[in-house]
Image (tube, rainbow, N blue to C red):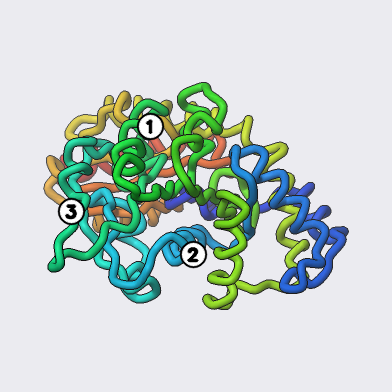
């Protein structure tokens, strides 16, 4: 049975060119600063993202947590959007690793009203923790890959900066955001002090993310990465794939967005499925099965019987993520299977 994996763009396989580059990579001990391929990747990444320096980390979660550790002092408070990845999916790392308190703000498609941010930033009071960091997310995972514009990021960041609070951007899929908006990614990262982005999602590398910021920030972050066990040795094997990801895989992200739109349009035509194709501008779709009378988990299990893998994100919602290893033909197969399953469910 052919498997069509729509659970996440993290399931992408490295390209043949990546595998070849990994096999031939020039390497050294990165803890000693001697891996030339790591140096090359970090230099390219900093230039592309518009920051002074960058640091290779094994995962996006590590990148976000290293950023928080570097920005924060123990006992400070972090402001995040209520459905953000850093709050929802990173195992309480802010509390565990940075001894930070979290303060969440409900957002709309990942956007927090600047007035709400201003109200959440603590004033000087003996009883209050100091507000130490504002965290943003673009694209926003749980909102369905929605995109923050440069104006929105700038408005939120300005509120924080006016009050002396640094801003970190979880940009795991920042290149998807830039592609959807048709702009240079640096327009999205310019307002923030640090940014993390992933190589191992839509860009197709097997492992790795980058954390970027000022040279001083990255020097401190490197030590925090070491604390977390992220001091890597001959990591150029991984960096070689990351270089190809940045140089050759960014431009093709538009294909993933196109295929997501095709799937969304097909799903919108299936009775009792609820999805607004216009609500999902990138490669992530969220569809409600509430009107079908079965749970999202059960519906996802029915897909799996046909070789289609998806992730339920709530009792009534299923997420689909397109990526380079899902073809347009597979999107059509997926639509047909879902239509058949819905007809069967409706029949009973």
Q: Is residue 109 left or right of residue 20?
A: left
Select label 3 or label 2 by which is in front.
3
- Which of the 4 image quadrants contains residue 346? top left
Q: Which mark is residue 154?
A: 1
Q: Which mark is residue 94?
A: none
Q: Which residue is mark 2?
A: 66
What residue sits 87% from the left and 61% below the top? Answer: 26
- Which of the 4 image quadrants contains residue 231? bottom right
Q: Is residue 147 above or below residue 73?
A: above
Q: SS of the residue at dot 3?
A: loop
Point out the tag, 2 or 1, that comes first from the N-terminus. Answer: 2
Point out the tag, 1 or 3, that comes first from the N-terminus. Answer: 3
Is residue 147 visible in this depiction of the protein?
no
Q: Which residue is mark 3?
A: 123
**Residue 235 spot, x, y in % from top left:** 73, 66
What residue sits 67% from the left and 39% below the top? Answer: 47
């Amino acid at each position: 049975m052919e498997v069509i994996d729509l659970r996440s763009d993290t399931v992408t396989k490295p390209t043949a060119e990546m595998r070849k580059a990994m096999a031939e990579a020039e390497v050294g001990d990165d803890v000693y600063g001697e891996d030339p391929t790591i140096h090359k990747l970090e230099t390219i990444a900093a230039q592309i993202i518009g920051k002074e320096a960058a640091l290779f980390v094994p995962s996006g979660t590590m990148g976000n947590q290293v950023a928080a550790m570097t920005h924060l002092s123990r006992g400070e408070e972090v402001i995040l959007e209520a459905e953000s990845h850093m709050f929802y999916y990173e195992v309480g790392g802010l509390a565990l690793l940075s001894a930070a308190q979290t303060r969440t703000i409900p957002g709309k498609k990942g956007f927090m009203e600047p007035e709400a941010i201003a109200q959440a930033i603590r004033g000087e009071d003996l009883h209050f923790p100091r507000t130490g960091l504002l965290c943003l997310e673009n694209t926003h995972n749980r909102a369905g890959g929605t995109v923050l514009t440069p104006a929105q990021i700038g408005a939120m960041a300005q509120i924080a900066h006016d009050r002396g609070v640094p801003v970190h951007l979880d940009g795991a899929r920042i290149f998807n955001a830039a592609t959807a908006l048709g702009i240079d990614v640096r327009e999205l990262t310019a307002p923030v002090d640090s940014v993390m982005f992933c190589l191992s999602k839509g860009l197709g590398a097997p492992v790795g993310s980058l954390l970027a910021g000022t040279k001083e920030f990255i020097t401190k972050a490197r030590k925090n990465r070491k604390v977390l066990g992220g001091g890597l040795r001959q990591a150029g094997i991984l960096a070689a794939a990351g270089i190809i990801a940045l140089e050759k895989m960014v431009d093709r992200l538009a294909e993933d967005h196109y295929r997501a739109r095709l799937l969304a349009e097909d799903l919108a035509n299936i009775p009792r499925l609820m999805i607004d194709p216009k609500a999902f501008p990138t490669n992530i779709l969220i569809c409600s099965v509430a009107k079908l009378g079965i749970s999202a988990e059960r519906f996802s299990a029915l897909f799996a019987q046909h070789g289609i893998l998806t992730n339920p994100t709530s009792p009534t919602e299923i997420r689909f993520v397109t990526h380079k290893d899902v073809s347009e033909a597979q999107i059509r197969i997926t639509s047909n299977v879902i239509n058949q399953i819905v007809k069967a469910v409706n029949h009973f």
